[in-house]
Amino acid sequence: MKNLKAYLNRIYRLSVNHSKQENFVWNDLKKLYSGSNWKYGIYEKEKYIEAVFGIGNEKGRRFFYLINNDYFHCTVNILENFPVELTTDLFILAAHFNNLLNNGVVTINIEKQAVEYSTKSHILIPLLYNGEIYNDLLRHYNASKDIYWAFQKLIDENEAPAIIIADLLKKLKEEEQNKK
């Protein structure tokens, strides 16, 4: 009976217009946050949530989660006010990440001197499967930690972007082997 109810709920969610579908996903996102102990703010009119999570040893970063035009967007500011003299290396490191990432993009904003990591996924999957919103948040957060680590290594140690990516891939491989 529970499976039938879930099936009928999915059919109903698919049958409504796009605006109502966005509202369903928006309400699911708010419900996820309201049941958590996370620090966040909800902006109802714009349909986004701003949250603060730690991604470095002592650093907290602002994460933004937005429902807009049939898409669920996740964005985080990785770096703010980067040194101008490292701009070329920042672009190279971002390009390496963009070649490796399956989902999302690392962008460099010259005017704000900022590095951002964003993902965008169609709302259809979170609309049909309730737990997918959390999975999207978790994937974005975990990738953000690695991206933050890499850019901090560039800023703090002035390491070459290719070496940073090689070290990151080695680190990820070791973590994967430790899970087994």
Image (spheres, rainbow, N blue to C red):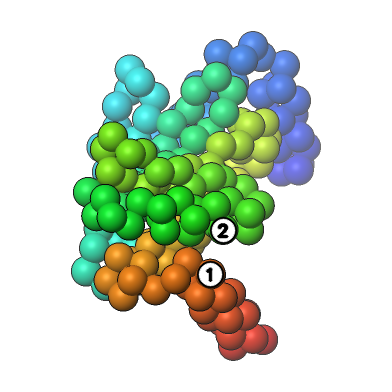
For residue 180, which quarter of the picture? bottom right
Residue 78 spot, x, y in % from top left: 35, 53
Near mark 1 (Cα within 10 A), the count class, few <14, some 14-19 or many ≥20, is few
The residue at the point 24 percent across, 55 percent down is 83
- Answer whether residue 145 is visible to the viewer in this image: no
The residue at the point 58 percent across, 81 percent down is 170
Residue 130 spot, x, y in % from top left: 59, 42
Closer-to-camera residue (57/169): 169
* Callout 1 secondary element: helix
> In this figure, which residue is indicated by the disc labeled 2?
96
Under mark 1, the amino acid is Ala
Looking at the image, residue 148 lies above or below residue 11: below
Looking at the image, residue 148 lies above or below residue 19: below
Number of the label disc, if any, that sits on residue 67: none
Of the image marks 1 and 2, the number of the one nearer the N terminus: 2
In the picture, the quarter occupied by the N terminus is top right
Q: Are marks 1 and 2 in contact (CB under 8 Å)?
A: yes
Closer-to-camera residue (3/138): 138
Closer-to-camera residue (40/122): 122
Number of the label disc, if any, that sits on residue 162: 1
Looking at the image, residue 43 lies above or below residue 75: above
- Answer whether residue 2 is visible to the viewer in this image: yes
The residue at the point 56 percent across, 58 percent down is 96
- Horizontal side of 77 relative to 134 (left or right) equals left
Under mark 2, the amino acid is His
Residue 6 spot, x, y in % from top left: 70, 37
* Callout 2 secondary element: helix
